[in-house]
Amino acid sequence: MQIAVIDFGIGNLRSVEQALHAVAADADIVVTHDARVIAAADKVVMPGQGAVGTWFKALDERALTAVVKQSLNEKPLLGICVGMQALFEFCEEDGGIDGLGVFQGSVKHFSNFHVQQEPCLKIPQMGWNQVTQSQDHPLWQGISDQSHFYFVHSFCANTQADQPAVVGTADYGHKFIAAVGRDNVFAVQFHPEKSHDDGLTLLKNFTQWNG
């Protein structure tokens, strides 16, 4: 089995690669921006850190748009952080960016959701937060509801966005989407590679998931 971790030239891809090696020692884990390698892989991980505009710029400059769309239709794909946000229809970051439209709804800055009566919350959210599993999914196997995962983000998708696809939520001044899934695609706002045992369990479940 080959798992392609898409290299957008941003973020710590080494930690994702090492975490996958830890849970799937027999798999061929390759960090790549070669469209041919991604197309041939059995599974794809689509990570992302930083700004969504930079993410889409790298997607375009590395000529990966077509193979990403192909993978979204054909094989198990895991989106992480910005790699999840990019799957929605629109993200307001960087002046507004059209997303890949796999899931309905928009990704907005936390300040759009927080109300004045709430205590001041630091943005970005950076640290551990509980995730409520809002529906069963194979990638939650062996992970207790309300487990903690590690988040780093200033933008989020409200739970009113594509409600049938929401498989996990968290709360930071308001409830937001922590995990979303449909068919062969599963994506998380948190970083499983930085989330200790539960994060590794989720990654292991992905390596065993047939979509």
Image (cartoon, rainbow, N blue to C red):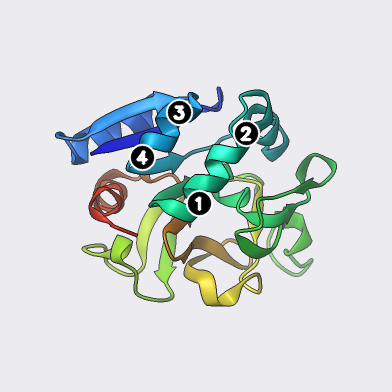
- Circle nearer the N terminus (1, 4): 1
Q: Nearer the viewer, residue 5 or 23?
A: 5
Closest to the camera, between mark 1 and mark 2, is 1
Q: Earlier in the sequence, mark 1 or mark 2?
A: 2
Up-down: is 207 above or below 168? above
Task: State the CA–CA distance, disc 3 to disc 2.
Answer: 26 Å
The label nearer to you, 3 versus 1, is: 3
Q: Amino acid at mark 1?
A: Leu
Residue beneath label 4, please? 193
Q: Residues within 10 Å of mark 3 (few under 14, many from 20)?
A: few
Comparing marks 1 and 4, which lies closer to the viewer? 1
N-terminal-most mark, 2 or 4:
2
Q: Is residue 150 visible?
A: no
Question: Which amino acid lies under the numbered mark 3 shown in the image of this protein?
Answer: Arg
Element under disc 1? helix
Q: Earlier in the sequence, mark 3 or mark 2?
A: 3
Residue 102: % across, % down = 60, 59
Q: CA distance from mark 3 to mark 1?
A: 15 Å
Query: Residue at label 1?
Result: 72
In this rendered view, identify the residue nearer to me: 121 or 105. 105
> In this rendering, does residue 29 appear at all?
yes
**Amino acid marked by disc 4:** Glu
The image quarter containing residue 1 is top left
Q: First in sequence: mark 3 or mark 1?
A: 3
Across and down, in percent, residue 118 comes to 70, 67
Q: Residues within 10 Å of mark 4 (few under 14, many from 20)?
A: many
Q: Whole-Å distance between the Cαs marked 3 and 4? A: 25 Å
Q: Which residue is mark 2?
A: 50
- Residue 22 horizontal/vertical position (percent): 20, 35
Q: In the drawing, does residue 166 fall left or right of residue 55?
A: left
Disc number for residue 36: 3
Cβ atoms under marks 2 and 4 closer than 8 Å: no
